[in-house]
Image (cartoon, helix red, strand yellow):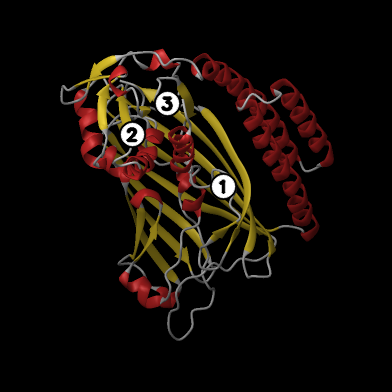
Amino acid sequence: MKPIAFCSLSLGLLAWLTVPAHAAESPKAPRYRLQVGQQLTYEGSSRFHYENGAHGTTDKMTFWVASQNGDGSWRIIARNENTFGQVHGKSDEPIPPGRAEEIFDAFDLYPDGRVANPPQGFREKGLPDIFFPMPADFASAQRGWQQEKEAGDKSLYLLAKQNDPESGKWVFERTDQGLFNEVYLSTSKAVIHFDGNRGLITRVESEYTQGYGFNGKGKGILELKSAARKDPQWIAQLASETDILLKAKAATRDALKAVQQGNDGDKNVAATEKMLRDGREKVKLPIVVAQFNAQLEQFKSSASYQAEEKKRENDVLNKVAADWSTVDIDGNKHSLAGYRGKVVVLDFWYRGCGWCIKAMPQIKEVVTHYEGKPVVVLGMNTDRIEKDARFVMDKLKLNYATLKAEGLPEKYGVQGFPTMIVIDQQGTVRGRHVGYSATLREDLIKQIDGLLTSRP
């Protein structure tokens, strides 16, 4: 079985917040109430047990309140250091240190939990889950409140039984519901403890289960380790150097797009590497210097991958599409030749690919958009077990045919999932979209509209 692309939640994705320090005559709804110069450090770990072993994470999260904006929000600089390890065999054995990852970025936070100026990939990285929304008022807190996410996903919040806001003791319970929970048979819950007198979360206890891919259950904990105040000059320097870093990150994203599009790839790579080295010379704080070093190495790796991906694209783009014939899940025959005269979109996916599942609501919208027009969307499923494909079809109520596509991805140079191949009315490949994108629907519609209005 292919490894699942979405599994148990890391504690790095758990929430923290502050509430008003004053416990007045009547309780008020909690609100973030940060102070410029704060440095908050949380540490935690999680462990997930399954049939043939276990995997776990360790997390260290640091938040600096860099400034307060004119609209009442705060500029937050965040650093999350986490490791992922795995052990095979007995699930109670110690987990050795494994893959390390670090997220360093900045955004603005409002007292009610709204996030502004988020970094690219904010939602995909799970950063919104660090700061969840507050109830509108105390009555809303008593009734419970929720956070709406993408594709119908949501988090539900309730006051726990041990909650006592009048004494400064707040306890929330959080339950996640949505597409991933349904497809991967998973649950995710957390109990969040607040010290209202200090205005800080002190502890998060999490529980999660999964019934597909990794079949098991796990627990985690996240605790406040320190709440310090940094020197104002140091905070100002951190904010200034972080701005330099974020501008460099934006430039690297533009350079990677140029490489992906085949626009002066070597020239862009060399110029971007020089830009990152020059930027590194402008900063002095070790944590920011380290981020420039990491960004430089990551850019080299990503640029190499994008160059290889561009070569794979060139092998199929604007060439006659490889022919094929197969059957769908219900045994009906399909062939590419049978769809000549229509624009054909092939969506290569499998159940264990979380990004594939995340893209499907947008693909369904594309199908609905072109209802009655000469456009056909075909799901090209590569699961070896048919019931996995049927499970996704039923859960997402897919409105397009799902074909058995084992052996067909190679015909189009598909290595990453999901991959969408767009074929014009004459059977020529005109588009290739790799991976999930928040604008996938718009990107596909724009390209298909161009094919529908062009003349052969």
- Which amino acid, mark 2? Pro
Tell me the quarter of the picture where residue 275 sits.
Answer: top right
- Asked if labels 2 and 3 touch by Cβ distance under 8 angstroms, the answer is no
**Mark 3 or mark 2, earlier in chain:** 2
How many residues crowd around disc 1 within 10 Å: few (fewer than 14), some, or many (20 or more)?
Answer: many
Which circle's residue, 2 or 1, is located before the other in the chain? 1
Find residue 1 and report its horizontal and vertical position in percent: 30, 20
> Which residue is depicted at the point 47% across and 54% down?
15
Please name the residue shown 61% across and 20% down the image.
307
Residue linked to disc 1: 61
Q: Is residue 339 above or below residue 448?
A: above
> Mark 3: which amino acid?
Asp
- Residue depicted at x 62% and y 43%: 104
Residue 81 left/right relative to 360: right
Which one is nearer the viewer's eye here, 348 or 188?
Answer: 348
Please say if 32 is above or below 303: below
Q: Secondary structure at mark 2?
A: loop
Residue of label 3: 424
